[in-house]
Amino acid sequence: MIAKRDHHVHDSELIHSSRSRRPRAGQGPTAPFPRAIARASWPVFGVLVYLLVATFIYRASWSTITADSSAVAGEESRAETRIKYDHFTYLGLQYYERQDYRMAEWAFRKSTEYGPDRPLAYNNLGSALNAQGRWNEAIAVLEHALSLDPTLAITRKNLDWARDEKAKQGR
């Protein structure tokens, strides 16, 4: 069984405390209810949180985009460098075939600018210098090519030829 209370409490006293009671008409200035303020501030708070999260997401995605674009720019730069290397190598080979060794030298020097780590670029330059009889320059360039790749047989042959021709001139 449920115990009954000895005294009666009105429902209005349970619901409204003295702090949150609405003033009745004509009882002074009306102040907003704390609960009403709290209810009204939730949407504002939600919007602020949304803006904060959106800002972080935007900044993170922007930094990813800019990082990706710089990576793409780096790839484009590498591709452009490769194209220029191939262009000047082809051009040098064309000049060499026509026995225009000065222009072949110029083109091969350009190819070494775009492919400084490519031993064949230096081998080609050494061949153009050999063809002009510039043995000391050819030897230095061909030795550099061998320092990049000591297994290149063609470079060894070109270097041996330059050394032999230099030795013949010394006699």
Image: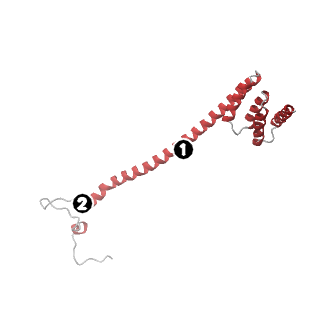
| Residue named by callout 1 | 67
Q: Is residue 11 placed above or below 74 in the rendered structure?
A: below
Q: Is residue 114 placed above or below 55 in the rendered structure?
A: above
Q: Nearer the viewer, residue 49 or 81?
A: 81
Disc 2, SS? loop
Q: Left or right: where does residue 108 sit relative to residue 76?
A: right
Q: Which mark is residue 134?
A: none
Going by the numbered disc 1, the residue's amino acid type is Ala
Q: Which of the 4 image quadrants contains residue 112?
A: top right
Q: Nearer the viewer, residue 41 or 103?
A: 103
| Residue drawn 69% across the image and 30% down it | 86
Question: Which quadrant holds the N terminus?
Answer: bottom left
Whole-percent x, y for residue 58 in the image: 45, 46
| Colour theme | secondary structure
Q: Residues within 10 Å of mark 2 (few under 14, many from 20)?
A: few
Q: Farthest residue in the left direction?
A: 26
Q: Which-is-in-front pick, marks 1 and 2? A: 1
Question: Which quadrant holds the C terminus?
Answer: top right
Q: Nearer the viewer, residue 138 or 157?
A: 138
Mark 1 and mark 2 in contact? Answer it, CB < 8 Å.
Answer: no
Sequence-first tag of 1 and 2: 2
| Residue drawn 77% across the image and 23% down it | 97
Q: Left or right: where does residue 71 sit relative to residue 23?
A: right
Whole-percent x, y for residue 124 in the image: 75, 31
| Residue named by callout 2 | 33
Going by the numbered disc 2, the residue's amino acid type is Phe
Whole-percent x, y for residue 156 in the image: 83, 37
Whole-percent x, y for residue 5 in the image: 25, 77
Q: Residues within 10 Å of mark 1 (few under 14, many from 20)?
A: few
Q: Nearer the viewer, residue 30 or 50?
A: 50
